[in-house]
Amino acid sequence: MPDLLLWDLDETLVTTAGAGERSIVRSAHKHWSVDVDLSLIPYAGCTDRRIGHLIRRHFGIGDNESILRAYLDDFVNFVSEELSQSDARILPGVSGIVEAVHISPDHEQGLLTGNLRAAAEAKLVPFGLWDYFSFGAFADDAIERLDLGPIALARASEYCASTFVREAVTVIGDTPHDIACARAIGARSLAVASGRFTMDQLAECEPTFLVDSLEEPAVLSFLSL
Ligand SMILES: [Mg+2]
């Protein structure tokens, strides 16, 4: 019975060094004619679709599915543009872990991310990471991150033609949303303080394991690698 790792993307696998945020601001300006100050909107860990709704509501703009769709499409286009001009980078420890999982006969890995699939691809291809993930759950699948866990598990079972006992599933992420996501499916959580949440803030959410960097050697033993 293999172990399954489900990875968050932003500030866990890579940091876009603000490219993702700039893309949100540009697309919101284009489609809703607003100047977004993201420090006023608690978007970390939310799906790309939920972030669109948070912005819309922040400015008292009514729900319009076609405008939201256009906002999301341009957001993805802007991500590719902005990434090429940013200091985006893969985070410490990530390369070694994804490669170790890749070559392990006892492990599988997929994505559990609030990114749209196209945005995830745009963010991971430049770092050679996209091909490590054959399955995943994305913002295309659900608007709320908590709903993505069961979808990711189902995709993993289908792709791997295997069932995963919940104790052998680990969700890796940098926000309280990732820890909640793990808890909701009975999985373990590996929280990493590589994003905007501190060790203390993440500790309050009681993850199974908490590190300040995936470079910490204890991560490999926690993941049975
Ligand atoms: Mg994240």
Image (spheres, rainbow, N blue to C red):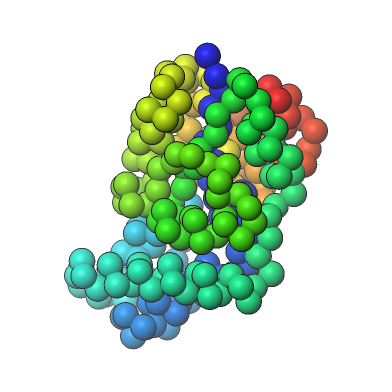
The residue located at (44%, 72%) in the rendering is 77
Determine whether, in the image, residue 100 is placed left or right of residue 20: right
Residue 205 placement: quadrant: top right
Question: In which quadrant will I find the C terminus?
Answer: top right
Work out whether 19 lies above or below 187: below
Work out whether 222 lies above or below 116: above
Determine whether, in the image, residue 50 is placed left or right of residue 6: left
**Could you say which is closer to the camera, residue 24 or residue 159?**
159
**Could you say which is closer to the camera, residue 83 or residue 43?**
83
Going by the picture, which residue comes out furthest to the top? 1
The residue located at (54%, 34%) in the rendering is 109
Going by the picture, which residue comes out furthest to the bottom? 33
- Find residue 72 and report its horizontal and vertical position in percent: 35, 67
- Find residue 140 and report its horizontal and vertical position in percent: 33, 52
Q: Is residue 139 visible?
A: yes
- Find residue 163 and report its horizontal and vertical position in percent: 42, 18
The residue located at (38%, 77%) in the rendering is 28
- Find residue 92 and report its horizontal and vertical position in percent: 74, 49
The residue located at (77%, 30%) in the rendering is 218
Work out whether 115 lies above or below 63: above
Work out whether 119 lies above or below 95: below
